[in-house]
Amino acid sequence: MAEEAKEEQPEKKENLRKDADSVILTSEEAGPSTKYQRNQHQQAEEGYVRVKLPNKKKGEIFAIADQLLGGSRIKCVCADGKGRLARIPGKLRRRMWIREGDLLIISPWEFQDEKADIKWRYTKTQAVSLSKKGLIPKEIDIY
């Protein structure tokens, strides 16, 4: 009798599926922020949304925006413990705004380690869900 009850209950799907450089979150965890993300949010199949992760092969790491300096420059605290001056490229500058305390993916420069380029900004809900799943390093996990 107990075996029949176990067979009737479907197995829960794993909320975390990893690819090479992304993770899939449930749509409730990933809340939309921009017009593009709202459209993607509506089109998400089965309630899952793909979220970008840092590509270690390209040297990308997590960082927290610490201070806005103006002129598309931000002082960041990185996952490796260093403070870096990050530059917002024009592609991101026009599309999304970055505020203090935002979780970012940055790519340190090869020839000047104290400088970096910003590659991605997470929304607050995306950052909180990544923190709950343990994907953000402890050094910068403020969520």
Image: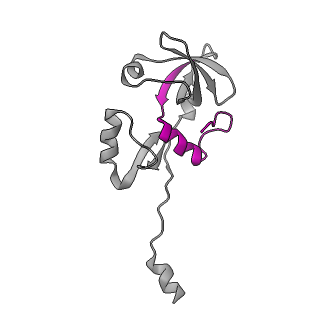
From the top left corner, tell me how far across and down residue 72 is, in percent: 48, 13
Examine the image and state in which quarter residue 138 appears: top right
Q: How is the image coloured?
A: one colour
Answer above or below: position of 25 versus 110.
Answer: below
The answer to whether any part of residue 81 appears in the image is: yes
The answer to whether any part of residue 21 appears in the image is: no
From the top left corner, tell me how far across and down residue 115 is, in percent: 59, 15
Answer above or below: position of 22 versus 48.
Answer: above
From the top left corner, tell me how far across and down residue 88 is, in percent: 47, 18
Which residue lies at the image location 38% right of the left edge and 20% below the top edge? 91
Q: Is residue 37 left or right of residue 11?
A: left
Callout count: 0
Which residue lies at the image location 50% right of the left edge and 80% below the top edge? 6
Farthest residue in the bottom direction?
1
Which residue lies at the image location 46% right of the left edge and 75% below the top edge? 9
Q: Is residue 38 left or right of residue 66?
A: left
From the top left corner, tell me how far across and down residue 57 is, in percent: 56, 33
Q: Between 65 and 52, which is closer to the camera in this rendering?
A: 65
Q: Which residues are magenta?
A: 116-143
Residue 48 lies in the magenta-colored region: no
Examine the image and state in which quarter residue 136 appears: top right
Quadrant holding the C terminus: top right
Which residue lies at the image location 44% right of the left edge and 72% below the top edge? 10
Farthest residue in the top direction?
71
Residue 120 lies in the magenta-colored region: yes
